Image: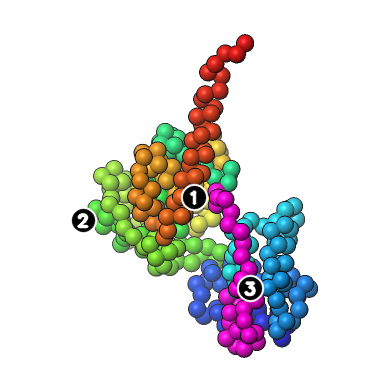
Amino acid sequence: MKTADFFTEWLADEKAELKLSTYEAMTNYINSHIIPWFSVNAPILENIKARDVQNYVNYKLKGGRLDGKSGGLSRASVSKHLSIIKQALNKAVIFEYLSANPAACVRLKRAKSIYTKRTVMLSTEEAHKLIEAFKGHYLYEAVVLALYYGLRRSEVLGLKWSAIDFANNEIRIEHTVVKSLTIEASDNTKTFSSHSSFDMFPDVREMLLSLKARNPQGSEYLFLNSKKDKVMRPDCMTRGFERRLLKMGFKKMRFHDLRHSTASILFDMEMPMDEVRIWLRHDDIETTMNIYVHWKNTRKKAISAKFEGVFSLT
């Protein structure tokens, strides 16, 4: 069987079991990257070896971008590609096209850190200035919630009034809104531990009561589109956030960097690492440790900038 035909067959079989956003993302990876490469550079399915899969990984890390830019895809992207290939070839073993999965032993070397120079981690003072800059803006409450509780964009957008328990002062994280090609609302969070709840701080309670009073009667979600009749689109939140930053003279950052900043602030407060992990709802401590390493490097640079010129050598 041609490898391209098998990947197409496998994706069709998986469609019924996948979230729509996951299926759309997989379709893009397979049709735009995996099938074109394996059709030209690999043998038929029955003859595929680990070397073929490793060659794909190496190629995508060094080149193979579809936007015309130089360089390879990010490690995160290539890792997703490799995961899809492994899943598909596992099914090929079940269907007895292969006796063993040739991708099983292929690994990506672990990156020293998942964070880059572009990752922004605000200090407490910087976060306070950011909150002030968003006062009166339609994303003010979203920014505050993201910073206080380290929420992902999908979790902020997924907040429903039914998850805001004013009687018990509790905010439940149990619903998300994501977008690949299509906007998808789901009662699933990114990981099992992400499905959680937080105490509602007094100032957050007042803020949310004010937002509820401004929202249309009976609205389901906290954050609505400009017509106030549907949930806000993820891309609209991103663009609105970036435009406000630019207008108010802030450095460029992603909405997800607010979650990183929550971690940064907790580390500034000398919170134990495991408590930071619990607050951010990480499945494992390693993810929290990666953030901690980046936070230390960020603070070291800040100290260096302040220390420069302390001594006069002339």
Residue drawn at 51 percent across, 31 percent down: 302
| Residue carrying label 1 | 290
User: In the rendered image, which quarter contains the C terminus?
Assistant: top right
Q: Could you tell which of marks 2 and 1 lies nearer the N-terminus?
A: 2
Please tell me which residue is depicted at 51% across the width and 44% down the height of the picture: 294
Apparent side of residue 11 relative to residue 274 in the rendered image (left or right): right
Q: Pinpoint residue 198: horizontal percent, then vertical percent.
A: 30, 54
Position above or below: 248 against 310 = below
Residue 135 lies in the magenta stretch:
no
Distance from the alpha carbon under mark 2 to that under mark 1: 37 Å
- Identify the residue shown where x is 51% and y is 25%: 306
Q: Position of residue 43 (x, y in %)?
A: 76, 78
User: Circle 3 sits in a helix, a strand or a loop, which is it?
Assistant: loop
- Tell us which disc is closer to us: 2 or 3: 3
Q: Left or right of 299: which side holds 28?
A: right
Residue in the foreground of this view, choosing between 2 and 201 = 2
Q: Secondary structure at mark 2?
A: loop
Q: Which residues are magenta?
A: 87-115
What's the mark number on residue 167?
A: 2
Q: CA distance from mark 2 to mark 3?
A: 52 Å
- Is 90 included in the stretch rendered in magenta? yes
Q: Looking at the image, do the residues carrying marks 2 and 3 touch, with CB atoms under 8 Å apart? A: no
- Within 10 Å of the Cα at label 3, are there few (<14), some (14-19), or many (20+) other Cα atoms? many
Determine whether label 1 and label 3 are within 8 Å by CB.
no
* Amino acid identity at mark 1: Asn
Which kind of residue does numbered mark 2 sit on?
Answer: Ala
Tell me the CA gap for discs 1 and 3. 27 Å
